[in-house]
Image: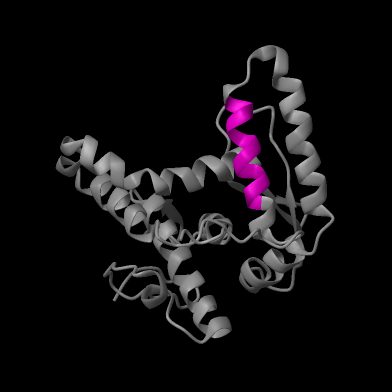
Amino acid sequence: MAKKKIKPKAGTLAAFWEKIKAAAPVYSQSPKSKIKQSIAEIQKIAEEFNSSSVPVSIASNFINPYIADVECRVFLEMDTGRKSFKPARHLNSDGAHSMAIDPIGIYNYIMSFKLAGKAIVESPRISEDFKEFRMISFMHAVSRLPEPYFFYIAVLQEMAVANDIVSVENRDGGYTKSDASSYLSMLWAFKEFERFYLRIQHRSLRADYAVIWHEGEWVQERRTRGYA
């Protein structure tokens, strides 16, 4: 007998993700005549999300620990002015920090993990580019995680970029963006979430979801970047 799918509890991140997962494809596939209706549905989800306890939980666990002495506001908002939707955008205006999560962007972000394995199989030449192959392979490895967890990883990845975690230090003391910043920021985000999971669940994230990925330990001491 097939297992009965348990419906996520209302007001939880998992419940909001189910709503986004249903609404986001409709937006991308709708004819122009129905776009306004689709946007209205997504905005309704955003309003419910923003009035719940989820944004505060995300901020307190995955943003505020990385921004000294500053509180950050988290909200779900569809950026209709952009053609390419970014899953999370860190905004800093006069010292006021906020993190905007785009419902279309986060949907595309999560689906990219789910499709990573298919990309490896159907695009054999991808292995000829080491950095691209490493990135896709890593995404495939962590795609076993529950889909709502990628909200946290997307936010943490944006924090890595905002804090220059994956930048390379120049001789003059400045920082230059690494040519592997997407992979490195995602790896850092995964490792930070792994630490959080261990602290809260008292279990290994990798063991629970059979994630196999070996990489050097991350080293971060003040503004020193790299691996050991």
Instruction: Indicate yes or no whether the magenta region holds residue 193.
Output: no
Residue ID at (50%, 76%): 222
Query: Which residue is found at the position 41% from the left and 49% from the top?
Result: 113
Looking at the image, residue 142 sits to the left or right of residue 43; the answer is left
In the picture as drawn, the residue positioned furthest to the front comes out as 1
Task: Give the answer, above or below, for where 146 lies relative to 135.
Answer: below
Residue 224 x, y percent position in the rendering: 42, 71
Up-down relation of residue 213 to residue 74 (above or below): below
Please name whichever residue, 51 or 195, is drawn nearer the observer in this view of the structure: 51
Instruction: State the predominant SS element of the stretch in magenta.
Output: helix
Q: Can residue 219 be seen in this snapshot?
A: yes
Q: Magenta stretch: give its range.
A: 17-28
Closest to the observer, 198 or 99: 198
Q: Residue furthest top?
A: 33
Q: Quadrant of the C terminus?
A: bottom left
Q: How many marks?
A: 0
Residue 169 is at least partly visible in this image: no
Decide: is 84 above or below 86. above
Where is residue 24? Give x, y as percent.
61, 35
Give left or right: position of 36 versus 193.
right
Residue 65: x %, y % from top left: 64, 74
- Render colour scheme: one colour
> Percent from the top left, x then y, of residue 145?
45, 62
> Residue 103 sits in which quadrant?
top right
Residue 148: quarter of image: bottom right
* Residue positioned most to the right: 51
